[in-house]
Amino acid sequence: MNPLIKRVAHYADVGPKHFEGLINLPHKIEVRKAGQEIVSEGDVVDFVFIIQSGWAIRFDLLDDGRRQILNFMLPGDCFDMMSLTNAKSDHNVSAATDLTLRRLKASDFLTAIKQEPALATAFWWVAVQEESILREQIIRVGRRSAKERVGHLILELNRRMAATTGKLENFLYLPVPQSLLADALGLSVVHISRTLTKLKADQLISTDHNGIQILDRPRLEKISNFDSQYLHLEKLTF
């Protein structure tokens, strides 16, 4: 639960004691392999999932099999909050890497956060952030150039990962293949590869088998038109 606690603490004055009711709820730890389904469109989901480790993707599929990734879900992320209203899922969720989840009954989760007003406020802010990320995704795919899209996503994921530690580093551990970046950004894998090569040639990033090193954050932010305000992570520090 530590990644969730650290992330939620960005939005409200909460600490481990506020999470005691949530931590003590009956739950099940589930493991998924990369590519395994978690939620399918049309499912009535009555559970809330908290990512303990690993990455997941939220996506839609077109009739011909093309996939649009709506966002990446990282350690500390909580989904699907629509389960609190017994709504049918309008999207799919699957594991992007090997994944460990904490699964809670939606009714138990709702009872626990009702008992902690500060926690309820914090989760409301989590929902606000997710909506902001989806708005940025629309702009990213609809209006940005390939170079802007890739740089913007690198910076977003870097800051979101930092939310689980409270400290912003210049390295993004990237455990997913370029094909997922392509499906998130509406580009081909070849285009993703070429764009990363251009960013490296401009000495903005370097890459290795573990991820991406940000070499010049101010310049990368400028060429990507990246403003982190939409993430509401003002507590992050170098």
Image (spheres, helix red, strand yellow):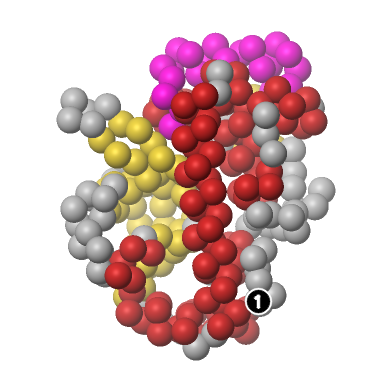
Residue under the point 30% across and 70% down: 85
Q: Is residue 112 above or below residue 74?
A: below
- Looking at the image, which residue is at 78% across and 25% down? 219
- On screen, 184 above or below 131? above
Query: Dividing the picture into quarters, in which one does residue 101 lie?
Result: bottom left
Q: Which residues are magenta?
A: 184-206
Q: Which residue is mark 1?
A: 14
* Residue type for callout 1: Val
Q: Position of residue 94 (x, y in %)?
A: 33, 46
Q: Is residue 195 magenta?
A: yes
Which SS does the magenta portion mostly show? helix
Q: Position of residue 180 (x, y in %)?
A: 42, 31
- The residue under the point 54% across, 39% down is 136
* In this view, 157 is above or below 20: above
- Whether residue 3 sits left or right of residue 218 in the image: it is left
State left or right for residue 136 relative to residue 41. Answer: right
Q: Residue furthest bottom?
A: 115
User: How far across and down, in percent of the image, does residue 233 sit?
Assistant: 68, 54
Q: How busy is the neighbourhood of tag 1: few (under 14 within 10 Å), some, or many (20 plus)?
A: some
Residue 174: name its quadrant.
top right
Asked whether the viewer can see residue 161, the reply is no
Image label count: 1
**Residue 157 percent across, percent down from the top left:** 59, 41
